[in-house]
Amino acid sequence: MKDPFREAAILLKHSRFTTAFTGAGISVESGIPSFRGEGGLWNKYDPKVLDLQYFLEDPSGSWTVIKEIFYDFFNAALPNKAHLVLARMEREGMLGRIITQNIDNLHQEAGSGMVFEFHGNTKNLRCLHCHRSYKAGQISLDHFPPTCRECGGILKPDFVFFGEAIPQLPLAAAYEAASLSDVFLIIGTTGEVMPANQIPVMAKQYGAKIIEVNPEPSNYTTEITDIFLQGKATSIMEKIERLLFPES
Ligand code: NAD
């Protein structure tokens, strides 16, 4: 019987351009819960706090929950082995791009450079009135809602809320990656969030081989996945690393 890990490593070694497409699952072992599934954030919080309309109607109420989830939780997290292996693959010329749905900055903290954040990043806040941008650390989150030092407008985390458009740059980078890639490595996503979930499907249509890492089957597994590596991101990526870089 064929060994899926060896098959995946061969594909990755021979690929001219590989893209990693990551979701909340890759950061679960860094201590950040996913939205859905067991232990998911939506079991505890109401997703409406990330609805743009709700935020505009009650910015203080939204901010109270947003701070707890995205600033108290996320700030304590560190990149895990799966983030680190992707960064190494990029350094060694085996990974062209990361398209992430995550907003936790952990790919960059792991050392990855070519990261395109489909849904923005928690590390920046933007003024809804004058559009000035701030680093999250520059702004006190002791009083809600935080406001702009220049114009007093309300600051919103600069990640994509329900009802907001995807930023142009990551959208273009994702479409391009789908058309360029020989291999798409999907890690830790259910594939439920539109329109991000269409990117691997496009890649498949352009001819990419799809390798998927997830402890559970996802929307992709039976539809487009060529090699399903079932398990947690850190242990699977550790095995992949040993096969890609056997000398170290
Ligand atoms: P999701 O919450 O819908 O699904 C998480 C997926 O990860 C599931 O398929 C689950 O089986 C898998 N998973 C769980 N533990 C894993 C592990 N140890 N290793 C690998 N996979 C594991 O997540 P999604 O599909 O990314 O979509 C949700 C949206 O949530 C995204 O748009 C993202 O912006 C946002 N989100 C981001 C973060 C973050 O930045 N870390 C956290 C929560 C949600």
Image (cartoon, rainbow, N blue to C red):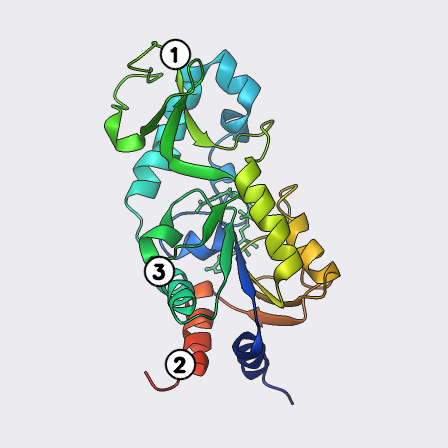
Compare marks 2 and 1 and give the one earlier in the sequence.
1
Mark 2 vs mark 3, foreground winner is 2
Q: CA distance from mark 3 to mark 1?
A: 37 Å
Pointer 1 residue Cβ closer than 8 Å to ligand 1: no
Q: Is residue 26 above or below residue 13?
A: above
Amino acid at dot 1: Gly
Disc 1: CA contacts within 10 A as few (<14), some (14-19) or many (>=20): some
* The disc label shown at residue 245, or none: 2
Q: Is residue 84 above or below residue 140?
A: below
Of 172 and 99, nearer the camera is 172
> Count of labels shown?
3
Proximity of marks 2 and 3: CB atoms separated by less than 8 Å: no
Compare marks 2 and 3 and give the one earlier in the sequence.
3
**Residue placed at 33% from the left, 57% from the top?**
110
Q: Is residue 205 left or right of residue 119?
A: right
Amino acid at dot 3: Asn
**Helix, strand, or loop for circle 2?**
loop
Of 112 and 49, nearer the camera is 112
**Residue placed at 45% from the left, 17% from the top?**
128
Disc 3: CA contacts within 10 A as few (<14), some (14-19) or many (>=20): some
Q: Quadrant of residue 185?
A: bottom right
Q: Is residue 119 above or below residue 15?
A: above
* The disc label shown at residue 80, or none: 3
Q: CA distance from mark 2 to mark 3?
A: 18 Å
Q: Residue furthest top?
A: 152
Compare marks 3 and 1 and give the one earlier in the sequence.
3
Position of residue 118 measured from the top left corner of the image (x, y, whole percent): 53, 43
Position of residue 50 measured from the top left corner of the image (x, y, whole percent): 51, 28
Q: Which residue is mark 1?
A: 153
Position of residue 172 measured from the top left corner of the image (x, y, whole percent): 60, 44
Of 170 and 71, nearer the camera is 170
